[in-house]
């Protein structure tokens, strides 16, 4: 197993200890896992593929899971789904299948001759970025809205970025410096997140596009920025 993969799992274990769950019994209880399974996670006795989708799903469903531990688990999933550990798309497919099954409990089975189902509101909890990355495939034509994170809930950098751009009241263009100010980070701490294919797809699902530019910030077109996709299309048609 790659060092980065092991490091991500170790981060989950460290978050557990930092949250006050120092003994094996407490850790197994808060993760909703058997003691033997929890022991293998803590001791690093994993398969080459790492933590399975079923195992991660059970941990995320725990009602007592601390926000800090949940954040580490989500970051692990992001890296694994994004191919950072060299895994196949089979893992991602299982997670997405669960999301689709939630929709099928509504009116998705009641469709017309064109394959279009009745209108419904689907509320999803879990990994926002994974949902946004594949939302066009899972739910074609759906309007996406992100709920605000609960107070005290730690978001990953990608989640914080997507949460910011889910605000419908933002102007059609914002600079990267402004984004850094809103997230209380320097842009250099966030820039690498925008290069992930999953983040690009998630931003597009929210109606935004990142435009990188070299050099220092300047006027319009003079620095890296984010633009609404609808605004860019209108500008292209006019020109």
Image (cartoon, rainbow, N blue to C red):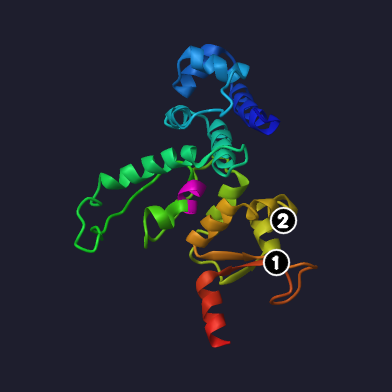
The residue tagged 1 is 224
Q: Quadrant of the N terminus?
A: top right
Q: Residue at x 45, y 15 (%)?
A: 34
The image shows residue 167, relative to residue 127, as above or below, that is below
Q: Residue at x 74, y 74 (%)?
A: 222
Task: Tell us which disc is closer to us: 1 or 2.
Answer: 1
The image shows residue 61, relative to residue 221, as above or below, that is above
- Residue 41 position, x and y percent, is 57, 20
**Label 2 Cα crowd, 10 Å radius (few <14 / some 14-19 / many 20+):** some
Taking the image as shown, residue 19 lies to the left or right of residue 175, namely left
Q: Residue at the right extreme?
A: 215
- Residue 171 position, x and y percent, is 56, 71
Q: Residue at x 70, y 66 (%)?
A: 224
Q: Secondary structure at mark 1?
A: loop
- Residue 155 position, x and y percent, is 57, 43
**Camera-side residue of 1 and 209:** 1
Q: Is residue 131 magenta?
A: yes
Q: Residue at x 71, y 62 (%)?
A: 177
The residue tagged 2 is 187
The image shows residue 15, relative to residue 170, as above or below, that is above
Taking the image as shown, residue 83 lies to the left or right of residue 90, namely right
**Label 1 Cα crowd, 10 Å radius (few <14 / some 14-19 / many 20+):** some
State the predominant SS element of the stretch in magenta.
helix
Residue 102: give its label: none
Dot 1 and dot 2 residues touching (CB under 8 Å):
yes
Q: CA distance from mark 1 to mark 2?
A: 10 Å
Q: Quadrant of the C terminus?
A: bottom right
**Camera-side residue of 24 and 212:** 212
Q: Which residues are magenta?
A: 128-133
**Camera-side residue of 221 and 88:** 88
């Amino acid at each position: 197993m790659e060092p980065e993969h092991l490091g991500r799992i170790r981060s989950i274990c460290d978050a557990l200890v930092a949250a006050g769950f120092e003994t094996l019994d407490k850790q197994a209880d808060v993760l909703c896992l058997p003691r033997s399974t929890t022991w293998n996670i803590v001791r690093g006795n994993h398969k080459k593929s790492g933590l399975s989708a079923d195992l991660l799903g059970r941990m995320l469903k725990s009602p007592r899971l601390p926000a800090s531990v949940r954040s580490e688990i989500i970051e692990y999933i992001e890296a694994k789904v994004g191919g950072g550990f060299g895994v196949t798309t089979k893992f991602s497919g299982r997670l997405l299948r669960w999301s689709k099954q939630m929709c099928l409990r509504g009116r998705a089975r009641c469709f017309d001759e064109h394959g279009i189902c009745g209108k419904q509101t689907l509320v999803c909890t879990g990994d926002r970025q994974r949902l946004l990355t594949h939302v066009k495939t899972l739910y074609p034509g759906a309007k996406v809205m992100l709920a605000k994170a609960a107070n005290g809930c730690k978001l990953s950098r990608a989640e914080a970025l997507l949460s910011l751009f889910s605000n419908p009241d933002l102007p059609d263009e914002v600079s990267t410096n402004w984004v850094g100010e809103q997230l209380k980070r320097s842009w250099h701490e966030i820039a690498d997140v925008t290069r992930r294919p999953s983040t690009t797809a998630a931003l597009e699902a929210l109606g935004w596009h990142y435009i990188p530019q070299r050099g220092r910030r300047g006027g319009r077109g003079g620095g890296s920025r984010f633009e609404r996709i609808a605004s860019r299309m209108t500008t292209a048609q006019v020109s």
